[in-house]
């Protein structure tokens, strides 16, 4: 029988098996010591199956031991994570078990402060309670506590629930229970924390002491291992068959037996969760894809293996439609092999583009990846994607059994980036450099993967700054990176390259002058930036640009006759040939409201097109999710890449797609003509890339040469006949960039842009410091004023990034900095640009007898009581994103049913109660009247 009155600072005291660590869902209490040993065993299995050779070697070097001793040390640390459960308040949560202890002298609390102490989170108790243990084991504790190995590992283990606590002070380390009475002031609590810790140490066989603090990146990796090991070891179905007998002794022999059984089972637990390492076999490009490489792909396939001999960053700049996706996948396989990386994350700007890419990544993985190949789709609505539902490869959605399917474990919570392969939105990666709960786990998930960032040019100053910080961390991890861009300025390219080099340990800036199209490689080991290689483009062509300066009459009532110099008249004239001459035209608008108004106007003036199925389409973000998916699928079918030469040769019926800028990224759409409202040059070139994108010999004659795409830019005029953004655009685009773009288009010789030859020069020129040279004094002063506002806005957003993001990897002397959330940082802060949709609502339609339906034309009952997974999916398929400005201060009428409050996905939804007045479905949202119609959600 354990003598609970003994404090014990040596390893002679046995753990008290009555102290429980797991209880919910089990037939009885599961001893803390068993869970600690289970977690240690799983950490060993993760070391073997998930951590790569390079990472294991770096950890061994950092702790000053062999890899085997380093492995045991990581197992020990993981096994200590829940020592903080040995406190009075935690044990008191199961009253029957606590009653067995409370009367014993070693556990009885006579100290009034201890009895008054509030609940102490067990992870906090781990942090406070373990510094002494590590000091007893020979870990140094210096005067500056936060830089002491004993404190660092205690703090690291205290972060296993996602947040690292503030560093302890020297006086707190010297007397933990005096400053934190919730630890328990009776000697048995401290004695048993030490007894458990020493027992884990003996059982695991980890005698090595850590003599110096771990570098920040390695601390993040080990914290990730601890969290994942804990999650795996906490699964009820794994614990229940391994419950010890009621009188289990917990002596060294029993502990060794329990640990041996856990260690034997742990590799299977890791495999069943879908964790492991992907293997990228050496295959030529033609062996990975069913078509020969174009010049860019061929050059990278031939030259990249020559310059890559370890981790690094590849920057690829090429026109839209030049096969950058396949280039990136092939390059990622080369870089993974040479660096020893064990996975891939393909990051895209939006949910729509991520969904569209998922099937392509899955096809690549099925044919060109071996080893562990579980593939996840990562964004907030991923679980509603029809391409990402559990298939026949899983049994009850619980295990990964075949191909690339991710099972239930990887699809739960924040685990998606732990899969060997993943595809999703870039914010899933960028959240790793925000101090959000489990943000460091995202960094761990990326630390040994190849990260591919598509559309690297598509982010504003704040998002770009976060990407810079992420690249610093990836450089420090030695994780390979592939950046893809169609319109990246030299200045932006330099900032991204230098960030990766800084993380890898090279402070001096490099001169980067990207070739277009072309590529360059940054070696992480030497910091060397290769000479940019310019390659021929498979899409060399002439882009013909027309500009039309128009009155912005888009908000005029339909009864008002369009002015001859107005936008409406211009659109009617431009699109008139479509009805009889055929062809597909994209009309790209700046805001959802203007896209809706444009669509309504075109329906009235192009009745022939409007009457034909597919003749006139509308695509924007403010449709319910299921409707937007249906429209997107229809657009990809109507305007996508032809499936055969025969299909490509067939003339297409006349069709117009009115859309917002969501079509300019990653969607493979092909139009005979692109019409766009004025936008910054980079965006205009992106949209132009949707023009005559594929080889179609029988394009309508009225659109010109089949090989020469056309772009018509509608430039809004103000009351003084100057090109200026209408007030309705708000801050969607910077006024300075719009003015510069307009001036640059005006100077185009013959309205011709040679693609790709002119693109890099134009993209750099629009940002040139001397752009205003040669302008009239008044025009120069006006441009200077606009530029000052743009620069000030950029600086402000960059400063926000500095204030909100975690520090760089070389400046982490306190793990608390990875979790410091004083500014109220949440994952919702990540948006693709200022003014982006930032909240969700669901429309419910009033039916007879006061019931509510999720559909306006049929009865789809609104789930009001207990909501299960199917009900949540049904509701989320009917949600629509809305601007945050619409949702602030919404009244009780817009609150969701009370039964939804316990479901995180539903709790913050705004409920739009739609009532039919005979002609329209309308609702109130604060002071706004909201209308639901065939053009989506609109506000009056």
Image (cartoon, grey):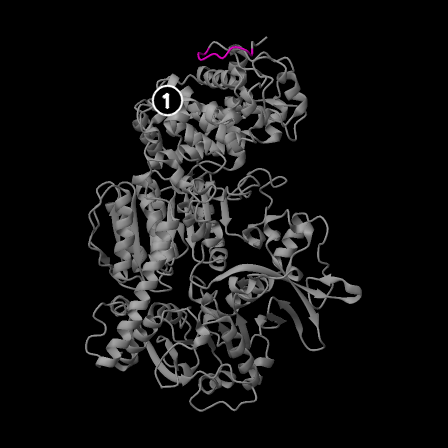
Determine the main secondary structure of the stretch shown in magenta: loop
528 to the left or right of 294: left
587 vs 895, left or right, is left
Q: Position of residue 242 (x, y in %)?
A: 60, 22
Is 258 drawn above or below residue 731 in the view shown? Answer: above
Kindly identify the residue that appears in the image at 61 percent across and 30 percent down.
236
Residue most extreme to the front: 112
Mark 1, residue position: 68
Magenta span of residues: 4-11
Which one is in front, 454 or 577? 454
Please determine whether, in this image, residue 558 is positioned above or below residue 646: below
- The residue closer to the viewer here, 530 or 809, is 809
Q: In which quadrant of the rendered image does the C terminus lie?
A: bottom right
Is residue 43 shown to the viewer in this render?
no
Residue 548 sits in quarter: bottom left
| Residue located farthest toward the right when viewing the structure as drawn | 849
Residue 765's image quarter? bottom left
Specify whether residue 8 is painted magenta. Answer: yes
In percent of width and height, residue 42 lies at 49, 27
Is 6 left, or right, of 921 in this rendering? left
Task: Say what secondary structure mark 1 lies in.
Answer: helix
Measuring from the top left, give residue 165's x and y in whole percent. Answer: 44, 35
Residue 122 against residue 313 in the figure, above or below: above
């Amino acid at each position: 029988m354990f003598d609970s009155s003994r404090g014990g600072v040596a390893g002679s005291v046995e753990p008290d098996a009555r102290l429980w660590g797991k209880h919910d869902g089990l037939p009885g209490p599961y001893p803390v010591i068993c869970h600690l040993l289970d977690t240690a065993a799983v950490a060993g299995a993760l070391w073997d199956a998930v951590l790569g050779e390079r990472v294991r070697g770096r950890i061994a070097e950092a702790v000053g031991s062999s890899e085997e001793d380093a492995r045991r040390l990581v197992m020990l640390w993981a096994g200590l994570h829940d020592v903080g459960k040995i406190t009075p308040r935690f044990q008191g949560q199961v009253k029957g078990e606590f009653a067995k202890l409370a009367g014993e002298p070693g556990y009885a609390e006579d100290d009034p402060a201890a009895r008054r102490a509030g609940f102490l989170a067990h992870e906090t108790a781990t942090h406070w309670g373990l510094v002494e243990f590590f000091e007893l084991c020979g870990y140094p504790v210096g005067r500056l506590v936060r830089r002491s190995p004993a404190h660092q590992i205690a703090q690291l283990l205290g972060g296993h629930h996602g947040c690292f606590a503030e560093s302890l002070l020297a006086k707190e380390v010297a007397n933990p229970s005096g400053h934190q009475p919730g630890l328990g002031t009776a000697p048995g609590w401290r004695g048993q924390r030490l007894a458990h810790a020493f027992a884990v140490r003996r059982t695991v066989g980890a005698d090595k002491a850590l003599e110096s603090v771990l570098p920040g990146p390695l601390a993040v990796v080990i914290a990730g291992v601890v969290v994942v090991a804990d999650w795996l070891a906490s699964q009820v179905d794994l614990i229940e068959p391994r419950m010890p007998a009621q009188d289990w002794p917990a002596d060294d022999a029993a502990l060794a037996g329990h640990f041996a059984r856990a260690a034997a089972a742990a590799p299977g637990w890791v495999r069943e969760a879908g964790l492991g390492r992907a293997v990228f076999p050496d295959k030529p490009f033609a062996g990975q894809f069913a078509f020969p490489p174009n010049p860019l792909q061929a050059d990278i396939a031939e030259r990249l293996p020559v310059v890559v001999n370890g981790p690094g960053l590849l920057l690829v700049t090429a026109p839209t439609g030049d096969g950058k996706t396949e280039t990136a996948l092939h390059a990622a396989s080369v870089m993974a092999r040479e660096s020893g990386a064990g996975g891939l994350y393909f990051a895209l700007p939006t949910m729509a583009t991520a969904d569209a890419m998922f099937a392509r990544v899955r096809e690549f993985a099925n044919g060109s990846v071996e080893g562990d190949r579980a593939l996840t789709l990562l964004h907030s609505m991923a679980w509603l994607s029809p391409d990402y539902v559990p298939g026949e490869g899983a049994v009850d959605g619980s295990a990964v059994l075949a191909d690339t399917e991710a099972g239930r474990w990887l699809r739960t919570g924040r685990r998606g980036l732990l899969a060997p392969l993943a595809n999703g939105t870039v914010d899933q990666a960028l959240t790793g450099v925000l101090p959000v709960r489990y943000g460091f786990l995202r960094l761990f998930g990326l630390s040994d993967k190849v990260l591919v960032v598509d559309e690297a040019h598509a982010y504003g100053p704040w998002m770009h700054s976060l990407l810079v910080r992420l690249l610093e961390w990836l450089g420090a991890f030695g994780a390979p990176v592939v950046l893809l861009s169609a319109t990246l300025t030299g200045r932006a390219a330099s900032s991204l390259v230098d960030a990766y080099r800084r993380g890898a340990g090279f402070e001096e800036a490099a001169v980067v002058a990207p070739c277009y199209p072309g590529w360059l490689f940054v070696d992480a080991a030497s910091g060397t930036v290769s000479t940019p290689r310019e390659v021929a483009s498979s899409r060399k062509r002439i882009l013909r640009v027309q500009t039309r300066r128009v009155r912005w009459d888009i908000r005029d009532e339909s009864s008002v006759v369009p002015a001859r110099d107005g936008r409406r008249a211009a659109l009617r004239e431009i699109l008139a040939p479509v009805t009889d001459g055929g062809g597909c035209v994209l009309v790209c608008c700046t805001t959802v409201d203007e896209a809706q108004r444009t669509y309504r106007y075109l329906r009235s003036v192009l009745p022939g097109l409007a009457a034909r199925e597919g003749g006139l389409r509308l695509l924007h973000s403010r449709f319910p999710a299921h409707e937007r998916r249906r429209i997107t699928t229809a657009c990809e079918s109507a305007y996508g890449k032809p499936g055969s030469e025969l299909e490509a040769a067939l003339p297409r019926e006349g069709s117009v797609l009115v859309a917002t800028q969501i079509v300019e990224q990653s969607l493979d759409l092909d139009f005979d003509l692109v019409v766009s409202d004025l936008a910054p040059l980079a965006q205009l070139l992106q949209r132009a890339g949707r023009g005559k994108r594929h080889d179609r010999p029988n394009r309508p004659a009225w659109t010109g040469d089949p090989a020469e795409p056309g772009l018509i830019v509608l430039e809004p005029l103000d009351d003084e006949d100057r090109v200026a953004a209408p007030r309705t655009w708000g801050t969607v685009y910077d006024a300075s960039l719009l003015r510069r773009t307009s001036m640059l288009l005006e100077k185009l010789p013959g309205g011709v842009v040679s693609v790709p030859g002119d693109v890099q020069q134009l993209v750099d020129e629009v940002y040139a410091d001397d752009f205003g040279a040669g302008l009239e004094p008044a025009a120069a002063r006006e441009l200077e004023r606009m530029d000052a506002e743009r620069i000030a806005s950029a600086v402000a957003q960059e400063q926000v990034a500095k204030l909100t993001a975690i520090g760089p990897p070389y400046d982490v002397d306190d793990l608390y900095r990875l979790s410091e959330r004083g500014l109220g940082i949440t994952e919702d802060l990540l948006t693709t640009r200022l003014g982006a949709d930032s909240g969700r609502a669901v429309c419910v339609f009033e039916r007879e007898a006061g019931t509510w339906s999720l559909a306006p034309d049929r009865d789809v009952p609104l789930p009001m009581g207990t909501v299960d997974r199917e009900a949540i999916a049904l509701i989320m398929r009917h949600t629509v994103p809305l601007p945050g400005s619409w949702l602030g201060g919404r009244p009780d009428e817009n609150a969701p049913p009370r039964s939804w409050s316990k479901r995180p996905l539903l709790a913050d939804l705004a409920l739009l109660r739609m009532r039919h007045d005979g002609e329209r479905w309308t609702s109130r949202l604060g002071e706004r009247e909201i209308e639901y119609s065939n053009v989506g959600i609109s506000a009056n």
